[in-house]
Image (cartoon, coloured by chain):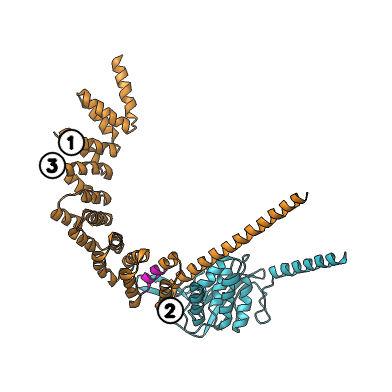
Chain colours: A cyan, B orange
Amino acid sequence: MSGPIRVRGLGVIVLMVIACLGNETIASSVLDITEDGWHTWRAPAIENSQTLCCFSWTGSGARQRICDLDSGHGNYSSSSSIARYSGEIQVYVFIEAGQASKISVLSPQCEVVASTEISDLGSVSVDDSIDWLRPYINAKSDVASDALAAISRHSGNYAFQVLTEVVESNANYDFREEAIFWMVMSETENAFAYIDRLIMGE
Amino acid sequence: MRNYTRLILIFFALIAANSAVGQDGDDIRDDEALKMVALEALMAAPSERALPIVIRVLEGNGSDEMKESALFILSQIDHPDAGAQLLNIAQSAGGELRLDAIRMIGISGGDAVDNLAAIYNSGDADVREAVVEAYMIAGNSQGLYNIAVNAENNDDFEAAVEMLGAMGASDELSKIRESAGVSDALINAYIISDDADALRELALNGSDLKQQANAIEALGIVGADDAEALLTQIYRESDSEFIKEAALDGLLIGDFDDSVLQLYRSSTSTAEKRELLQRLVMMDSDQVMAIIDETLAGDQ
């Protein structure tokens, strides 16, 4: 009689752990963001990557303009006519009730405006930055796509690992597709080797 | 009871097996779909990165859908090797892949379009049809004109001329009319291109009764502003029963029942009235009821 009860009890504990994971608090020791409003940090970027800014598109090409973080249009893009860069990315997050409701990644040189003050958290490591963004890749999050895009712009293997995990095992098919797209957009050796294997079924 | 239990067990086993098969099937579909997503994502990649992968897909054993998608991406890659690869497949591959490659040359619109004429001349009917489509996609009316004036059979001539109609290439169609005369294909091209002016001119030209009749009927299809008045005029003024019949057909096709009713009322011939009434019935016109009312009122 005691055996089955213990198993049932274990099941309850497992369910509780799963429930806690579902409501994971978005915070890390380095990026301990608790206040509502805009926050930003810099993290190492992919080498020689496309400049991510806001552009006005005219007949003669792209013209860089100031990014309005509050406009809510996911308002960044890249242009082949704009010089590439190496260095850092600038991640912007807007926190409401302790959760990110907007995420943008831009090149640090891009001018931005926001309706409220932007709290600058300085430079952080790739791991800390991705660890902060990664929990937002879930079906309940409204900023999952933006988190994926932001992660893909980080240098090093960790971003690639996260994208690979999403492609191979995320329960949300749309995220898997988006991860593939952002992997291609990262233009790294790892990414193209992976895409090649994926397409060829190897 | 044991049998009953066994049945239940078999039932659940079947459900489990079916769901397992369904799961595998979904996985396979997902895998194929993800491959396609990855392939299509390469459109956003630098050409030197995308090209080797796309070529590997085309040379590999992937599905027809994958290869078709790869061909499209190849057509969008701005790299000399991409055009050369596309041309190579269009010239030497077999089956549907070759036909797709030919059409993709039209989409790419690059220098490879210049090679379509040679592919056309050496190809079978399917290849020739694909080249005609490629010229249309590329907006290359000169290529289609060349095919039309050099066509060795009527099917090839019709295909090229009607495609010129689809492109609205009135200059080329005029030149073809000058060199080859009026044909069914040319009138079809005028219909496709909605060229009421050309059809109006042919409808009033009595030098070739058959083509005049075709043009008159075509006016009903195109339905120009003055088509109803013109068809009525032709009907009234023509001495040819053949042309009158064509004008009536045009009025029927254009659904111009008001004019048919006027012709009915102005006619003094019982036979003609019968024919006009038959046309109105064929047109499912409400005017038939008006005629019946008038007839009944006359009887009273």
Q: Name the kind of residue labelled 1 in the image.
A: Phe
Residue A55 visible in the current orientation: no
Whichever of labels 1 and 3 marks the residue nearer the N terminus, that label is 3
Q: Would residue B226 appear left or right of B293 to someone viewing this image?
A: left
SS of the residue at dot 1? helix
Q: Residues within 10 Å of mark 2 (few under 14, many from 20)?
A: some
The residue indicated by pointer 1 is B242
Q: Is residue B73 magenta?
A: yes
SS of the residue at dot 3? loop
Evaluate whether label 1 is on the same chain as label 3: yes
Whichever of labels 1 and 2 marks the residue nearer the N terminus, that label is 2
Q: Is residue B286 magenta?
A: no
> What's the residue at 33%, 77% (across, down)?
B80
Query: Rounded to the nearest whole Å, what is the CA distance between mark 1 and mark 3?
Result: 12 Å
| Residue B206: image tag | 3
> What's the residue at 68%, 81% (across, down)?
A29
Above or below for B228 versus B298: below
Evaluate whether label 3 is on the same chain as label 2: yes
Evaluate whether label 1 is on the same chain as label 2: yes
Query: Rounded to the nearest whole Å, what is the CA distance between mark 3 and mark 2?
Result: 63 Å
SS of the residue at dot 2? helix
Residue A62: horizontal and vertical position, in percent? 40, 74
Q: Residues within 10 Å of mark 3 (few under 14, many from 20)?
A: few
| Residue B49: image tag | 2
Residue B12: horizontal and vertical position, in percent? 69, 55
Tell me where the magenta segment starts and ends, as one range: B70-78
Q: Name the kind of residue labelled 3 in the image.
A: Gly
* Marks 1,3: beta carbons within 8 A: no
Residue A13: horizontal and vertical position, in percent? 78, 68
Query: Rounded to the nearest whole Å, what is the CA distance between mark 1 and mark 2?
Result: 66 Å
| Residue A202: image tag | none
